[in-house]
Image: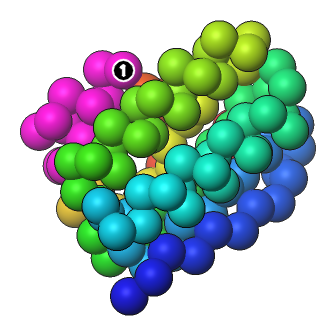
Amino acid sequence: MDLRISSRTVGDRRVVVLDGQADLGTVPLLQSGLAREITGAGRATVVVDVDGLLSLDDVALGVLLGAAATARDHGGDLEVLTTSPRWRERFRATRFEHAVTIRDHIV
């Protein structure tokens, strides 16, 4: 399966919706998609909605961490949106939630 990336604006936040598989095979697409959205957002917060993902491997988690650092370097931020207990547990177990804000709704 492939990774599909779409985006929309909700209030003052850019929401990037991921659907499919975020893994070693789709990392280039994930990196370029997030970089484009972060660059376009300027100093705003980019929210990445992961509820549509079927898989999220360690490499993709690293890409999300790198994207958060890039957003902060540009004066913005990156947050992750999920209502999935599966992804919430993954973020807790990997301590990802200590580096990136995890939300269950767009603020």
Q: Is residue 93 magenta?
A: yes
Furthest residue to the left? Answer: 93
Task: Give the class, few, some or many, for how many residues have Cα within 10 Å of label 1's Cα (few <14, many ≥20).
Answer: few
Task: List x then y, in percent, for residue 51.
Answer: 45, 66
Looking at the picture, tell me which residue is in the foreground, 7 or 12: 7
The magenta stretch is: 88-99
**Quadrant holding the N terminus:** bottom left
Regarding mark 1 in the picture, which secondary structure is present there?
loop
| Number of residue marks | 1
Q: Mark 1 sits on what residue?
A: 99
Q: Quadrant of residue 82?
A: bottom left
Q: Is residue 88 visible?
A: no
- Expressed as whole percent of the image width and height from the top left, the position of residue 60 reads 34, 50
> Residue shown at 50%/43% (left/top)?
80
Provide residue 58's location: percent of width, then percent of height: 21, 48
Q: Is residue 79 left or right of residue 93?
A: right
Residue 86 in sight from this viewpoint: yes
Q: Is residue 5 left or right of residue 28?
A: right
Q: Is residue 52 above or below residue 95?
A: below
Q: Position of residue 75 (x, y in %)?
A: 74, 11
Q: Which quadrant is the C terminus positioned in?
A: top right
In the rendered image, residue 36 lying in the magenta stretch gets the answer no
Give the residue type that dot 1 points to: Ala
Image point (71%, 68%), residue name: 6
Q: Main secondary structure of the magenta part?
A: helix
Give 35 or 105, whichever is nearer the viewer.
35
